[in-house]
């Protein structure tokens, strides 16, 4: 048996070109003593943090495979919660840019995330219509709330109560009591999808945005158990009010939510997002168009002043009718929320965020546009007649639309990319944009030999020549009447060929001419038309062989015609694809040509006789680009399925797959040395892949891919089985089985089996003998510890977020031994908190079987005694530490005469004052 051929693996090197992804929202971050300078935005699978003053990327929070869908910052500003399209959540530290914890509970992409006021809990909603509440301290999921029927659009914690508010595309807003995990209130006042809502900082007003032009306002009242609760007086219903507008919640939950009214937007499209300033005085709203609308939230004093003016106007109006008395008007939503202006931005908006300027009265607004740019604007302090002043724009770090073409310079240090309206040159090392040139809908770009000029083919058939040192277009040549499909350089680099829909291939020679507009002393480059090859069909791709003999033309009739370069005589016809050929490449030794088509197949042909060596089903969608690595027969192909694959052109085998793009890949190119591969796709991202020293064996690579597919299928089956068993309960468990949880269960099983083996070895040795059993190698590797300690070490290695799901997967045959081990852990004082958590969850899951087992009854009795004593010791330790800290606090306060924890003491004093007032009010009423 021969040895397998070995290849070098290509690894992801960098991802750039994305300012902000459209699927994710943008956020102002409070970092480095500034709340207006830093903005977080999604960038495919990463999160970029931009400095809007310097327009530079200061931090990258790196993800794995899936794109970012939503962001939320913690109240302290030290952490950032990131939701992904696979349903996972990651908490990043903004100090170290590292992942703190990863949660997996949703079965589809996360659509919204919200922190509570203390930053101790996190709520997430997703497209699967489920809400999950996570415990950030214990790093685990608390419960999953089911009730909505469509995608969750927004969620928010109520700071005055242990409650959660959620909205969905099913037109409902639900109130959840988190103590009982029960939905006690469903607001049905909307006739279309509820896209977003905001809750005022004092939790008294709820503003919702739907598919119409009005923003609805709901008044929220809270009561205590000892208060005489009286809901807001209901206003008289109008014709536009529905029957359920003033429906109140059950008073036992202490909340009443009534319709306060609505106020109109000037735009008629649906609400995309609502944003409330941190001080609660400004509401920013936008739809799918280019308009931002601002609303001012009046204070109580401003409302009183406004109502006095309103009553004065009414009295003046009714002065003629002396018999009729002027009715005192009620406060309406339009009196509380005032439209103060609207402003236009250069493109359609996807997300917006607002923050208050540090040490000032103004506001700063960041807007994410659909064309991959961020706009930062400043609103004046006077909100009567506000003005939005643009103070920054992030756009140079990416194209406005997806790139269609890319190429390397001759030294491999620069990358040229072309999109609809611009061509950008990038530094390969730093991934910074060096130069940007405006074009008329570019389709293809190529560097001219010497790298001082480059060619651009456009949609209108013009050929543009751009000068790199001056950064401007020096000439536009009308090359074809229609779109230029491809440009290929001669093998001797003295000219190039272009192809178009006009069924022709035109040959051009480079020439130098004097141009006074360009320079009075030096000549500039131009192109002179020399020959034309007329064909019977539209030409999609053109390619030259490196031996300067052949030119290949891919036609719309699914064939490839090969001609001699010198005489343009027909040489070969390559026919075999069922759909038109979209890309092709010829090896450096001119012996092999590869073609890719819309039929998802690639074919390898010999250029000697035109015979097809091999046809391979390569991608799951159309093949868009391909290129041979220079001086090799290794081929890279890209497709609309978002993958890049490497093939061996001699053995016709698949070597590896490069996954990274979140959409179709339009172009790939290789540098002259073959060390780097550049790719661009529909997700607007540019990616570099570098050749490493790691060896790839195709058989092992294929086996690993099959194992990954089997694991994904297993996890999917387990998650479906779990949902079927749970049924449609309102609250279910939050976690879901993943690869990590299954691996954790397997590690626990292996550790328990090792403990059993060691226990059997110990029982076989007679007590009067001096011989000892051989120590297990695993225990020696852990420092010659006991088998009990080894099980505890394995248990501690499992992440807190995956622990419960791993215990759920654990077979019951291991549970009795595991309970005995937990008893030893607690009795010896080893990780009492972790042991009690495992014990309680196992009792909850296997309650029926454990209670009916006679063997486990004495174990449970010992566990009851040991856990009570162990938990009491922990409580004593914590109480002692708290008392010591309080003693140190009092000593420091006595020395420095400084009160610590001012916020906590102020809140406590305010609560006591409120209680005294309520007590006095109750005595007066009695």
Image (spheres, grey):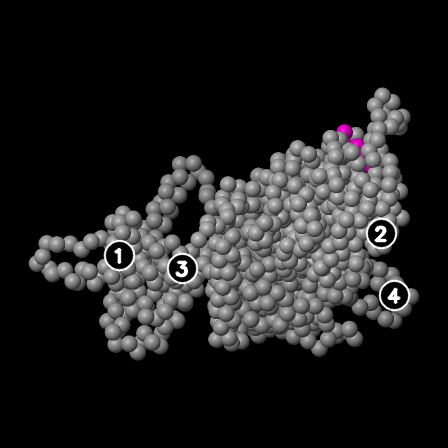
Residue at 48% x, 66% y: name it.
714
As rendered, which of 823 and 885 lies closer to the eye?
823
Q: Which contiguous range is marked in magenta?
A: 465-469
Q: Quadrant of residue 620?
A: bottom right
Q: Quadrant of residue 316?
A: bottom right
Left or right? Give the position of 738 relative to 235.
left
Q: Are marks 4 and 1 in contact (CB under 8 Å)?
A: no
Residue at 65% x, 75% y: name it.
247
Q: Residues within 10 Å of mark 3 (few under 14, many from 20)?
A: many
* SS state under label 2: loop
Q: Give the residue pinned by disc 2.
A: 535
Residue at 83% x, 55% y: name it.
537
As rendered, which of 677 and 700 lies closer to the eye?
700
Q: Quadrant of residue 497?
A: top right
Q: Give the residue pinned by disc 1.
A: 787
Q: CA distance from mark 2 to mark 3?
A: 64 Å
Q: Give the residue pinned by disc 3.
A: 744
Q: Are marks 3 and 4 in contact (CB under 8 Å)?
A: no
């Amino acid at each position: 048996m021969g040895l397998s051929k070995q290849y070098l693996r290509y690894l992801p090197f960098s991802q750039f070109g994305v300012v902000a992804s459209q699927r994710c929202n943008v956020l102002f971050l409070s970092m480095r003593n500034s709340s207006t300078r830093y903005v977080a935005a999604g960038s495919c699978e990463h999160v970029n943090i931009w400095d809007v003053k310097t327009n530079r990327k200061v931090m990258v929070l790196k993800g794995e495979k899936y794109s970012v869908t939503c962001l939320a910052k913690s109240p302290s500003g030290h952490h950032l919660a990131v939701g992904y399209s696979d349903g996972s959540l990651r908490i990043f530290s903004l100090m170290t840019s590292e992942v703190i914890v990863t949660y997996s509970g949703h079965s589809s992409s996360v659509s919204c995330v919200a922190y509570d006021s203390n930053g101790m809990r996190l709520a997430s909603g997703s497209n699967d219509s489920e809400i999950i509440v996570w415990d950030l301290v214990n790093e685990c999921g608390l419960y999953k709330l089911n009730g909505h029927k469509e995608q969750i659009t927004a969620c928010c914690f109520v700071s005055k109560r242990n409650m959660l508010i959620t909205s969905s595309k099913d037109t409902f807003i639900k109130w959840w009591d988190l103590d009982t995990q029960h939905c006690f209130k469903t607001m049905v006042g909307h006739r279309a999808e509820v896209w977003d809502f905001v809750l005022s900082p004092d939790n008294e007003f709820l503003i919702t945005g739907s598919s119409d032009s009005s923003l609805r306002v709901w008044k929220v009242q809270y009561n205590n158990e000892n208060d005489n609760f009286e809901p807001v007086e209901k206003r008289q219903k109008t014709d536009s009010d529905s029957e359920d507008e003033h429906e109140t919640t059950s008073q036992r939950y202490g909340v009443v939510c009534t319709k306060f009214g609505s106020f109109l937007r000037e735009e008629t499209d649906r609400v995309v997002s609502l944003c409330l300033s941190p001080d609660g005085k400004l509401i920013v709203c936008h739809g799918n168009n280019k308009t931002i609308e601002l609303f001012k939230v009046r204070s109580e004093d401003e409302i009183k002043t406004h109502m006095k003016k309103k009553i004065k106007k009414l009295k003046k109006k009714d002065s003629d009718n002396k018999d009729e008395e002027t009715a005192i008007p009620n406060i309406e939503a339009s009196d509380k929320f005032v439209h103060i202006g609207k402003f236009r931005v250069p493109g359609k908006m996807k997300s917006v965020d607002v923050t208050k300027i540090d040490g000032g009265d103004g506001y700063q607004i960041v807007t994410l546009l659909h064309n991959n740019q961020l706009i930062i604007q400043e609103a004046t302090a006077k909100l009567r007649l506000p003005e939005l002043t643009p103070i920054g724009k992030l756009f140079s770090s990416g194209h406005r639309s997806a790139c269609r073409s890319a190429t390397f310079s001759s030294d491999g240090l620069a990358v040229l990319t072309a999109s609809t309206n611009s061509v950008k040159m990038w530094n390969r090392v730093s991934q910074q944009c060096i130069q940007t040139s405006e074009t008329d809908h570019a389709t293809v770009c190529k560097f001219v030999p010497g790298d001082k000029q480059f060619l651009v083919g456009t949609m209108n058939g013009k050929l543009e020549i751009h000068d790199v040192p001056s950064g401007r277009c020096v000439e536009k040549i009308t090359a074809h009447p229609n779109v230029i499909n491809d440009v290929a350089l001669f093998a001797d680099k003295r000219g190039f060929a272009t192809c178009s829909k006009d069924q022709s291939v035109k040959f051009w020679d480079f020439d130098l001419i004097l141009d006074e507009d360009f320079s009075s002393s030096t000549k500039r480059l131009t192109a002179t038309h020399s020959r034309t090859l007329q064909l019977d069909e539209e030409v999609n791709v053109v390619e030259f062989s490196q031996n300067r003999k052949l030119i290949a033309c891919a036609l719309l009739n699914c064939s490839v015609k090969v001609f001699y370069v010198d005489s343009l005589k027909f040489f070969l016809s390559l026919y075999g694809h069922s759909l038109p050929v979209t890309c092709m490449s010829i090896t450096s030794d001119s012996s092999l040509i590869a073609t890719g088509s819309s039929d998802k197949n690639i074919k390898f042909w010999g250029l000697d006789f035109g015979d097809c060596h091999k046809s391979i089903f390569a991608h799951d969608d159309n093949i868009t680009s391909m290129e041979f690595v220079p001086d090799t027969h290794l081929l890279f192909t890209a497709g609309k399925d978002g993958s890049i694959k490497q093939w061996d052109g001699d053995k016709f085998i698949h070597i590896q797959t490069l996954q990274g793009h979140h959409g179709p890949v339009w172009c790939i190119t290789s540098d002259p040395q073959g060390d780097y591969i550049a790719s661009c796709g529909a997700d607007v991202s540019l990616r570099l892949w570098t050749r490493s020293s790691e060896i790839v064996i195709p058989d092992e690579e294929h086996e690993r891919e099959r194992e990954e597919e089997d694991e994904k299928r297993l996890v999917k089956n387990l998650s479906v089985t779990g949902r079927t068993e749970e049924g449609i309960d309102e609250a279910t468990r939050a976690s879901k089985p993943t690869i990590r949880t299954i691996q954790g269960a397997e590690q626990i099983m292996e550790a328990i089996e090792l403990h059993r083996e060691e226990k059997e070895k110990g029982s076989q040795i007679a007590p009067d003998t001096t011989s000892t059993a051989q120590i297990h190698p695993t225990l020696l590797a852990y420092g010659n510890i006991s088998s009990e300690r080894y099980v505890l070490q394995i248990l501690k290695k499992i992440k807190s977020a995956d622990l419960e799901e791993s215990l759920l997967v654990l077979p019951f045959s291991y549970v009795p031994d595991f309970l005995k081990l937990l008893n030893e852990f607690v009795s010896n004082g080893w990780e009492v908190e972790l042991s009690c958590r495992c014990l309680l969850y196992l009792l909850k899951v296997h309650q029926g079987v454990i209670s009916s087992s006679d063997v486990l009854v004495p174990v449970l009795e010992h566990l009851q005694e040991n856990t009570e004593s162990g938990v009491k010791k922990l409580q004593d330790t914590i109480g002692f530490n708290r008392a010591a800290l309080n003693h140190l606090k009092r000593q420091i306060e006595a020395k420095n005469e400084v009160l610590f924890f001012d916020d906590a003491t102020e809140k406590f004093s305010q609560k006591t004052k409120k209680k005294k007032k309520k007590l006095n009010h109750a005595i007066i009423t009695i």
